[in-house]
Amino acid sequence: MEGKTVGLFLLCLAAAGCQSGAAGTAARYDNVRFMDVWSTYNRCLSTDDPQSAARYSVSLQEMSERQTNQSPLGNILPATLKHVIAQPSSRLAVDVHAMAASCSLHTGTLALSIGEHDLAKSQFTQILNGYAQSDYSYYAEQALARLAHPALSFQAFLK
């Protein structure tokens, strides 16, 4: 009887140990991902160089796309049903899509302020193309307003 109790105790201990190790690894991984996203976003907003901001913007766009493409259902469902399924919620404590749009808006504004009109226009257009849905309408409205800037409007007229 005592042997069975010890065996049962060891089995429970082993099962609990296996589960607690996996949760700790996942939490550490999510924390690293969060810190990478957060530091990239902060560097984007703190730089005064449009080229550096553009690199951070590309990095955040890639992170945003990876997060969107992680849906396992999107890979097995037919295209006609994909629009019905909601994206799974992010495990991150931030909205990577909003951070990417914010960084692009900042990059475009920086570029516009120093006369890099092509970069500004590409950043604002990227926001309009990628963030027109209602959750990100603020960024789309801001990008549209900045595209109406006289310097960009005049440049478009010349082309």
Image (cartoon, rainbow, N blue to C red):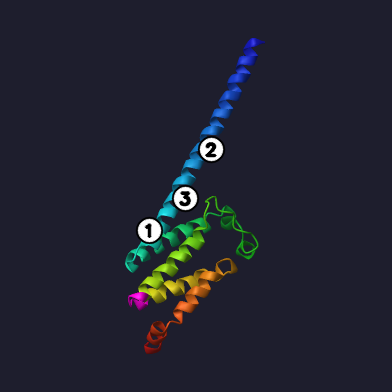
Q: Secondary structure at mark 3?
A: helix
Decide if residue 69 is in sight here: no
Q: Secondary structure at mark 2?
A: helix
Span colored in magenta = 113-118
Q: Which residue has dot 1 on it?
A: 43
Q: Are marks 2 and 3 in contact (CB under 8 Å)?
A: no
Residue 126: x %, y % from top left: 45, 71
Q: From what the image shows, is residue 39 above or below residue 13?
A: below
Nearer the N terminus, badge 1 or badge 3? 3
- Judged by depth in the image, the label closer to the viewer, 1 or 2, is 1
Residue type marked 1: Arg
User: Is 118 in front, or is 12?
Assistant: 118
Q: Quadrant of residue 39?
A: bottom left
- Judged by depth in the image, the label closer to the viewer, 1 or 3, is 1
Which numbered circle lies on residue 34? 3
- Count every numbered label the image shows and give the total: 3
User: Is 59 in front, or is 142?
Assistant: 142
Residue type marked 2: Ala
Q: Which residue has dot 2 on it?
A: 23
- Mark 2 is surrounded, within 10 Å at the Cα level, by few (under 14), some (14 to 19) or many (20 or more) other residues, namely few
Q: Quadrant of residue 85?
A: bottom right
Q: Quadrant of residue 7?
A: top right
